[in-house]
Amino acid sequence: MMGIFGAIWGIVGLSLVFGRGLFCLYPYVEELAWNTFTWIHWLSLIISLLFMGYSEGYKGFHLKFSPRAAARALYLKNNPTLVRVIFSPLFCMGFFHATKKRKIVAYSLTTMIVVLIVLVRQLSQPWRGIVDAGVLLGLGWGLVSVWLFSIKAFFGKGFDVSPETPDA
């Protein structure tokens, strides 16, 4: 029972983190004055959406993070410990009980994301909203992708993704 709770908490916790990001970014996109956009603003928006949709949404989340997070939630269901269950969102992100490479990537990416958030906050509108529109697309893609891979991991057949744990 503890494993099932941990797996659910891991996916719900990830969903809350991503959902909070979406909730916080949306107002900056919503306040864009679309009717004042020049060609450079439209071009920048298209580039932001294409770049972030592909690099963050597809390559980052759909191909790498989401299947692994679902695999780690499935691993947690079958190998629960009190610490893993309590901190299961962090476990699913690969912050602990992971291979050395996975931990380095998790901590490095998190640091990079925090730095980028600080930098993007310095931008004025419409540039901040243009960047945030791309991030919304990528993060939204990531959230849906985590849900789809989690469903496949727990209810589908043939889910064979490494949880990248030291013992796997």
Image (tube, rainbow, N blue to C red):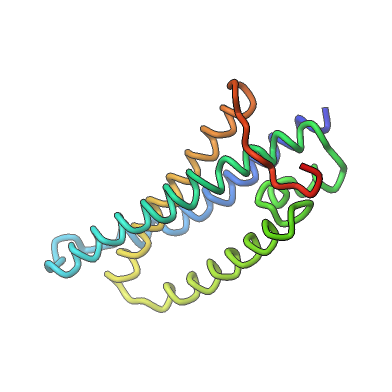
Q: Is residue 41 left or right of residue 107?
A: left
Q: Residue 31: where, in percent of width, then height?
A: 30, 61
Task: Name the outermost residue toward the right.
Answer: 82
- Which of the 4 image quadrants contains residue 79? top right
Residue 52: give x, y in percent of width and height.
37, 57
Q: Where does the N terminus fall, quadrant-wise?
A: top right
In the rendered structure, the answer to whether residue 6 lies left or right of residue 25 reads right
State the residue at coordinates (67%, 56%).
Answer: 102
Q: Where 140 sits versus 71, above or below?
A: below
Q: Nearer the viewer, residue 59 or 150?
A: 59
Q: In this view, does 44 lie above or below 16?
A: below
Which residue is depicted at the point 70% across and 34% down?
Answer: 74
Point 33% across, 58% down: residue: 51
Q: Name above or below for residue 58 compared with residue 130.
A: above
- Residue 36: x and y in percent read 14, 67
Indicate the position of residue 3 as horizontal and vertical percent values.
Answer: 80, 32
Label count reads: 0
Taking 99 as reference, is 142 left or right? left
Quadrant including the C terminus: top right
Residue at 12 percent of width and 67 percent of height:
39
Residue 4, picture quadrant: top right
